[in-house]
Amino acid sequence: MEIIAGLSINSVGSILTDPPYSSANSLRCSRDVLTSRKYSFRPGKYPEFDGDCRDQRSYLAWSNLWLTKARAKVISSGICCVFSDWRQLPTTTDAIQAAGWVWRGIVPWDKTECARPQRGRYRNQAEYVVWATNGRRPLAGPTAPGVIRCRPPVHRLHMAGKPVDLMSNLLQIMEGPILDPFMGSGSVGVACISIGLPYIVIESNKDYFELSCERLASFYNFNK
């Protein structure tokens, strides 16, 4: 939030980010569990990540805070896309509107049939992108897909890492610079480099920051 506050007004074209969802944290025992035990079958393979200890009410308050600060830096009509799972979807749509954004809809990410099945239940196959604009947005320019179907990355650097192709699809109608306040393993940055969009990335976890910077530098040098 300190870094966002230091950005100049109108210095951000759009926001595309994947914050820590704090899913299933209604009980204290859930908030105390390591992220690797909630989201990975291989504890210790990936660094733990920050900010996943909030219950739903505090997640709403926190999301409202950073979304409000970020909107003050985004150009008029700029797009904001925030990832969510099914548990936090209602909270995320509330937070984005409370922060003053104009909520425009939801883009489902279909993770394909490779998503983990659960016997006797529907496959938990989708996550969601809540998208909004900073005020009015003209009906002009290209059209982006309303549902994006692509499998999660087979080789990932973050236990909750998203595929670069997913980010590239979402970026089709966005103006740069792109702000990603939760860089993680840098998938948004890689997608921005691949299509030539400037970007601003922020990450509070030192391990992921160093890992992502190395990934972005390698990808940039390879594609020069």
Image (spheres, grey):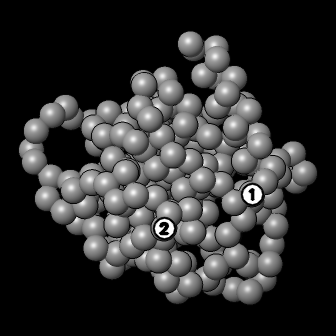
Task: For label 1, count other residues whose C-alpha is less than 10 Å away and answer few (under 14), some (14-19) or many (20+).
Answer: some
Please name whichever residue, 70 or 16, is drawn nearer the observer in this view of the structure. Answer: 70
Going 54% across and 56% down the picture, which residue do you hit? 181
**Mark 1 sits on what residue?**
205
Please name whichever residue, 189 or 158, is drawn nearer the observer in this view of the structure. Answer: 189
Q: Do the residues labelled 2 and 1 touch (CB within 8 Å)?
A: no
- Where does residue 61 sit, x and y in percent of width and height? 49, 83
**Mark 2 sits on what residue?**
5
- Where does residue 116 sit, x and y in percent of width and height? 65, 47
Which residue type carries mark 1?
Asn
Above-or-below relation of 41 to 86: above
Using the numbered discs, state the Cα–Cα distance from disc 2 to disc 1 in whole angstroms: 19 Å
Above-or-below relation of 36 to 117: below
Which residue type carries mark 2?
Ala
- Where does residue 140 sit, x and y in percent of width and height? 10, 38
Task: For label 2, count other residues whose C-alpha is less than 10 Å away and answer few (under 14), some (14-19) or many (20+).
Answer: few
* Label disc, if present, on residue 42 of the rendered structure: none
Residue 35 visible (yes or no): yes
Going 61% across and 49% down the picture, which residue do you hit? 183
Which picture quadrant has residue 22? bottom right
Which picture quadrant has residue 219? top right
Kind of element beneath mark 1: loop
Going 69% across and 23% down the picture, which residue do you hit? 218
Which picture quadrant has residue 69? bottom left
Residue most extreme to the right? 44
Number of numbered labels in the structure image: 2
- Where does residue 10 sit, x and y in percent of width and height? 31, 54
Above-or-below relation of 163 to 117: above
Which quarter of the rendered picture does the N terminus lie within? bottom right
Residue most extreme to the left? 139
Residue 145 visible (yes or no): no
